[in-house]
Image (spheres, rainbow, N blue to C red):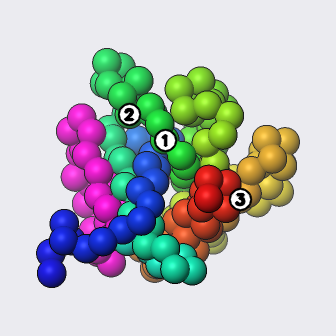
Amino acid sequence: TTEQDRKYTHIFKIVLTGDSGVGKSQLLSRFTKNEFSLGTAATIGVEFSTKEVQINKDTVRAQIWDTAGQERFKAITHLYYRNAMGALLVFDIQSPQTFQNLDRWYNEIRTHSGNDCIIILVGNKSDQRHIRAVMPDDARRFAEERNINYIETSALSSTNVEQAFLQLIQNIYQNYK
Ligand code: GDP
Ligand code: MG
């Protein structure tokens, strides 16, 4: 059967946010296709990929939206965030700048997706932790202050990618069922 034929009982819209270059598109392709590429294919506008996840007796279709920097596509911001039930807020552990910008992204999610949207903070590129520039304690503090979870991932080595998405999907499921 094709993906369209498959039956699902729930559909969850999830958005990827964070600075350009932090690895959002690679996290998505790792999770949905188990693929990674070292190059960066610039995302034009908005696209989404789907993946079915079994929880108890339910089949959840995660519809995961990916986009290029919101700066370049201000017009789609509202559509992008509208009705999102979950968000991965991603920064690059090698880049303090991407960590400093988290607050802006966090506020954007809260403004457009609301207070019920489940957010998980993701420190990506953990395979580069020997040259990390953002300390785990600082990331943990940012997350604790906003009552969200923190996880470190590597789209390159696959570490925790599935865990990050599954944790988010399960949290949404518990929240909305
Ligand atoms: P986006 O702009 O947030 O979508 O970022 P991309 O997914 O396009 O990734 C930006 C760059 O970081 C690309 O060169 C990727 O190959 C690289 N990248 C993404 N994830 C990882 C990772 O976990 N580890 C390493 N070392 N590089 C990564
Ligand atoms: Mg991208």
Which mark sits nearer the N-terminus, 3 or 1? 1
| Residue 142 position in % (x across, y down) | 78, 44
Q: Are the two marked residues, 3 and 1, in contact with CB atoms closer than 8 angstroms?
A: no
Magenta residues (range): 22-51
Question: Callout 2: few (<14), some (14-19), or many (20+) C-alpha neighbours within 10 Å?
Answer: many
Q: Is mark 2 within 8 Å of ligand 2?
A: no
Q: CA distance from mark 2 to mark 3?
A: 23 Å
Which residue sits at x=41%, y=24%?
78
- Foreground pick, 51 / 107: 51
Which mark sits nearer the N-terminus, 2 or 3? 2
- Foreground pick, 139 / 106: 106
Q: Amino acid at mark 3?
A: Tyr
Quadrant position of the C terminus in the picture: bottom right
Residue where numbered disc 1 is placed? 84
Please tell me whether mark 2 sits on a helix, a strand or a loop: helix
- Foreground pick, 39 / 85: 85
- Foreground pick, 59 / 33: 59
| Residue 92 position in % (x across, y down) | 55, 53
Q: Amino acid at mark 1?
A: Ala
Residue where numbered disc 3 is placed? 150
In the displayed structure, would residue 73 be above or below residue 93?
above
> Magenta stretch containing residue 24, yes or no?
yes
Question: Callout 1: few (<14), some (14-19), or many (20+) C-alpha neighbours within 10 Å?
Answer: many
Q: CA distance from mark 3 to mark 1?
A: 19 Å
Which residue sits at x=49%, y=41%?
84
Residue where numbered disc 2 is placed? 80
Looking at the image, which residue sits at the far left? 2
